[in-house]
Image (tube, grey):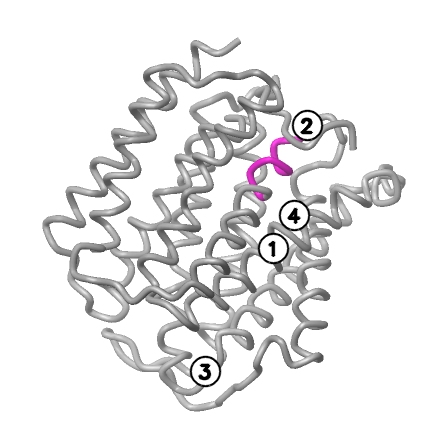
Amino acid sequence: MTQIANDTRAAVPVGVSGGLLLAALSATTFGLSGPLATGLLDTGWSPGAIVLTRIAIAALVLAPFTVVALRGKWRLLRTQALQILLYGVLAVAGAQFCYFSAVATMDVAPALLIEYTAPAAVVAWLWITRGQRPGRLTVAGAALAAAGLVLVLDLFSGADLAWSGVAWAFAAMIGATSYFLISADTDSGLPPLALAGAGLVVGAVTLGALAVTGLLPMHANTAATAYAFGDLPWWAPLVLLGVVTAAVPYATGIAAIRLLGSRVASFVALWEVVAAVLFAWFFVDQLPGLAQLAGGLLIIGGVVAVRLGDRDIS
């Protein structure tokens, strides 16, 4: 791996507009995971069992596409083993494990807010390591997005904080930051599908090891899952979680990051929080308030500002 944080956009025919569409698709499908998992949690599934099953299914779904992407390039699994290992351990397993450890001792909203400081961490990393000092538009966009995130997560209603939870949430932020930085590396030669597929395998194995040691509690149930529109058999949300909310967003997310660069892609990913609120409305009948809708608009405005500011960086 020549460098982890390559923020140079790849010269590909899809272009920036295609990258934005892929990033939006990735963020939207990621956002579906919470509302889908809610039904399983209500029937007695543990977060660890859900996330392990989700990542394992995603790894199986992407396996044939990974094989095709690596045709004639199998040596990359050896030469880029460190990148794949870091992606699987930090960006997949680490982010998931630390986030669920955080929400075990604190409210979901502040945990998400801490984890989603990842875009600011990406900007800081690129500034420190590559000298890409953020311009005024980038800073203004970051401020808008942060304000929007606070509104969407409804933090003003009060939140339960615990120092252990805060520490786990910051660890999840490191995992999320590594996701954007590692995915942006275009020098490794690893196709996006290959990195996603191989990284998910590493992530599933890592989560499995945590489950075996007891660090990741595992509880499952075969009872039907209830949602606002009706009941589903227990396996249906698991399949959706693995295919729609993991295989699709990890694959499209890496492709988007390579097109947009880690800075812009990390801010577009904030749309995941807005999508989660909208999906919660449909799946579990949690109606978003005016403040949350306003927060979504601020996040979109912040992303536009960051994108415009990104043009000024050589």
Q: Is residue 156 above or below residue 251?
A: below
Residue topped by disc 2? 186
Rendered image quadrant of residue 37: bottom left
* Label disc, if present, on residue 196 of the rendered structure: 4
Q: Is residue 189 left or right of residue 227?
A: right
Q: Earlier in the sequence, mark 1 or mark 3?
A: 1
Residue topped by disc 1? 92
- Which residues, given as a range, are shown in magenta? 179-185
Residue type for callout 3: Trp
Mark 2 neighbour density, 10 Å: few (under 14) some (14–19) many (20 or more)? many
Q: Nearer the viewer, residue 312 or 238?
A: 312
Q: Earlier in the sequence, mark 2 or mark 3?
A: 2
Q: Is residue 3 left or right of residue 273?
A: right
Select label 1 or label 2 by which is in front.
1
Q: Is residue 229 above or below residue 297?
A: below
Residue topped by disc 3? 234
Q: CA distance from mark 2 to mark 3?
A: 39 Å
Q: Earlier in the sequence, mark 1 or mark 2?
A: 1
Q: Residue at x 26, y 56 (%)?
A: 277
